[in-house]
Image (cartoon, grey):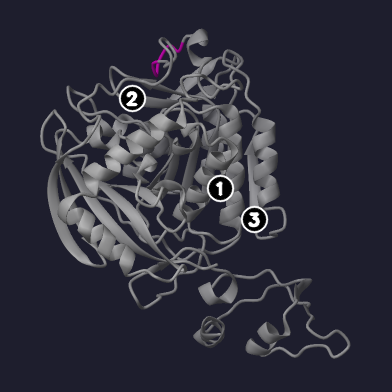
Amino acid sequence: MEVVYQDFSLWIEALDAGSLVRIQARSPAGEAWEEVQLPGLAEPQESRCAPGATPPVTGVPPAAVAPQRDLAVEAAVRAPDHDARCRGDALFRAVFSGRVGRLFASSCGTLPDPRRGLRIKLHFDPTKPFAAAPCSLPWELLYDAATKDYLGINPLTPVVRYIEVPRAGEVAPFQPPLHILLMASNPATSTPLDLQRERRLIEQAWAQDPEVLVRVLERSDRERLQDEVSGVAFDVLHFMGHAGFDDASGAGALLLEGPLGQSEPMPGEVLANLLKGRLPRLVVLNACSSARALSGAGRDFFAGLAAALVMGGVPAVVAMRSPISDLAAIRFSRVLYRQLARGQAVDAAVAEGRRALYGEAPGSPEWATPVLFMRVPDGRLFMGGRDHGDGASRGAGHGVADGVFIKARNVELKNSAIANQIGLSVDAASPGSIQIDSDTFRAEGSSIANKQTSS
């Protein structure tokens, strides 16, 4: 089902070092603002890893990496769902109160059609003195007790984060093939991860699409990564492995493999600079605490992994807010790419990934670990750029209606009505089926798209 989204945008600004914030809302139903106390904002934003579990970005001790993205499920990660629901409810009641709450209710009321969604877009300005504090909160847990609805797992209300940086948010129309680079990093000094399984599931998600090319870096080190990104321009960079975060400096790093198999940290800023000039449309950091950022007291907000990539100009970054088990990371990755392969917008695909984790373990808040930083207006990273005319964005789309190239050699159109719409005759010997035997089929004009969208 194709979903058309409208934005419910929230600008969240901490006014002091405590819990007071200003919320400014812009929505289909108008604008409003409130000053509220956010629960948990004044608490220290320490690492959620066990003591000693978060390695610094330099000189990573081998034992320090073990608790991150473990094969075993850590008790600290598998907290009771009651706590997650209470925290999500407290956040929801704080934000959606008063004028902003009435605006949200009105905006939801303008969307009676299940094919229309309301994207919850959270804006953070890193130039503000206390920017990292509200950004560190678990917004994906937002819970509406009145409807018993977690906003972050409902594809009709995807929750995305928007960091305001001096970069363009638009992306050029997509031109196949889709190039995906998988980086697998499992240093000998770190906990072993089931990266081969994650690789297989990603490859399976795209196996039926001849316009998708998946390249795998079996052993990710600095030299191999630089060689890859200086060659083919990849549309998706997917990192699977360990990451580190330094609470003192607020710096994050991917843990690549050194010459002797040891962990070799690559800071977020270094990765962002390596990608410049050939920026992927989407970067997925399937590693613990890769979404974290700190500010104040000499810390650089953009020293965090995800924030550095956003500043570098990457349109969409999926990262992990806190530690995540290996099993959950693999499940999320499988569903994310399956939904993207079906034509979903990236925010809807992330919501489906979270929902899959929730369905597998509803007693754990781990489903709220994946975070999406998205600057592209409509989340459509791999579709042709077609103006929908109503200022809204579509969450999923297939075929010529979105200007996508279709690999048409040995493609069957099973529905004769579709064949008639695009001006092709149906073989009388095989009613309802048609075989196209050409190299490539492309919708050049708007007439075909109009015929499909009006049907």
Residue 106 lies, in percent from the top left, at 26, 65
Residue 380 lies, in percent from the top left, at 46, 61
Which residue type carries mark 3? Val
Based on the displayed image, in which of its 4 quarters is residue 186 positioned?
top right
Left or right of 234 on screen, residue 347: left
Residue, disc 1: 336
Marks 3 and 2 sit apart, C-alpha to C-alpha, by 34 Å
Task: Give whichever of discs 1 and 2 has the lower sequence position.
Answer: 2
Task: Give whichever of discs 3 and 2 has the lower sequence position.
Answer: 3
Which range of residues does the magenta coloring cover? 56-60
For the N terminus, the quadrant is bottom right
Q: Secondary structure at mark 2?
A: strand
Which residue type carries mark 2? Ala
Residue 251 got which mark?
Answer: 2
Left or right of 336 on screen, residue 292: left
Residue 290 can be seen in this image: no
The residue positioned 50% from the left and 28% from the top of the image is: 324
